[in-house]
Image (cartoon, helix red, strand yellow):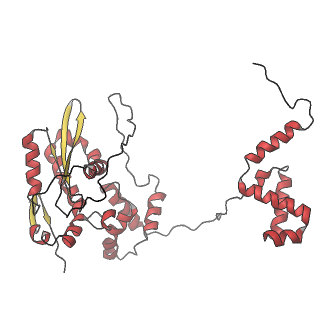
Amino acid sequence: MRVQHIGYGARGFYRIAGLGRRWDMTPQDAQRRLQILHFLDEHGLEATLDAFGVSSRTLYRWKATLKAQGGNPAALAAQSSAPKQRRTPQTDARLVAENRRLRTLYPKLVKAKLDVLLAPWCVQHGITLASVSTLGRIIARAPDKMRQTLARLNSLGQRKPLRRNLKPRKPQNANSSPLEVLASDTIERIRDGLRRYIVTFIDPVSYFAFAWATPSKHARHTARALQWDLTVLPQTPKTPKMNAHAERFNRTIQESFVDYHEDLLFTDLALFNQKLADSLVFYDTQRPHHCLGQKSPLSFLIQHQPECQRCWTHTPVQGYRIRKCRRR
């Protein structure tokens, strides 16, 4: 292919073209400052001060910078105004340690939920509770961001890509009372040809949830898990057609618990269910939920479902007991 140089032989053509490309890549604030300097050269200092409100000291500093960089307009771009010497955070080390402990024990807890959980702990230890933003900065300053990231590997030992599919949401006009509807689903895990299943249930209104691991999808295992769940419900719930809440709870329980205890799921199913029950006690009775106004599902139910105060005083569920503290 033959290439023709249009500006060949025209003196200064390529220099002007280069300036044009440089201008296109110049930040907007630098272009604005260069226009102010051109106005200064044409109309004088006083007119420039009246028109743009820039001090004479700033104008001459811009001119000196432009001259030192050989007329490159990009040199006029605004630089970072952050101070060179910054204050060292004076956060209590005990608060940082408790923040990390909660993030380690219950992964995926965000700063707003940590603020709710740390409030009584700070009162007990006489520590001033930091704001939600400060808790977020404590996490951000940590080298590992106080985060445990587990990689999912395929049969070849390669990292599996994260794939998220959009799930259908419930209709806007679909309203129900707490514990009237119970969404259910199943999580399947496979390792070395061995399959394990986790049956999950969640109330779409109060977000009160249950889960139980089973060795197979046989009807007797699912029926046993459902029977355990029905023992704590004041009425027999219905099953919704939309399963978005169950799918979202599946993701939550996998990211916060199953991924960290998957070995027990295949080696010691009873111990896995015991630890799962402890995790669900925290999820249902202490963990703040954004959609519930940073309340736990149990607190939401006690507030909006008065009969739950009589039903869940000492209720055995999946080998553990939920003990409700009555409001004084």
Q: Position of residue 241 (x, y in %)?
A: 21, 49
Q: Position of residue 96 (x, y in %)?
A: 40, 64
Q: Position of residue 284 (x, y in %)?
A: 22, 61
Q: Nearer the viewer, residue 258 or 44?
A: 44
Query: Is residue 110 found left or right of 261 in the rendered image?
Result: right
Q: Quadrant of residue 159?
A: top left
Quarter of the picture containing the N terminus is top right
Residue at the front extreme? Answer: 173
- When the figure is inspected, residue 131 is found, relative to residue 138, above or below; the finding is below
Q: Nearer the viewer, residue 239 or 102?
A: 239
Number of numbered tags placed on the structure image: 0
Q: Is residue 166 visible?
A: yes
Q: Position of residue 113 (x, y in %)?
A: 35, 64
Q: Residue at x 30, y 66 (%)?
A: 292
Q: Residue at x 9, y 58 (%)?
A: 236
Q: Quadrant of residue 296?
A: bottom left
Q: Is residue 318 visible?
A: no
Q: Residue at x 77, y 53 (%)?
A: 75
Q: Nearer the viewer, residue 10 or 146?
A: 10
Query: Is residue 66 found left or right of 179 in the rendered image?
Result: right
Residue at the top extreme? Answer: 1
Q: Nearer the viewer, residue 77 or 145?
A: 77
Q: Residue at x 83, y 73 (%)?
A: 50
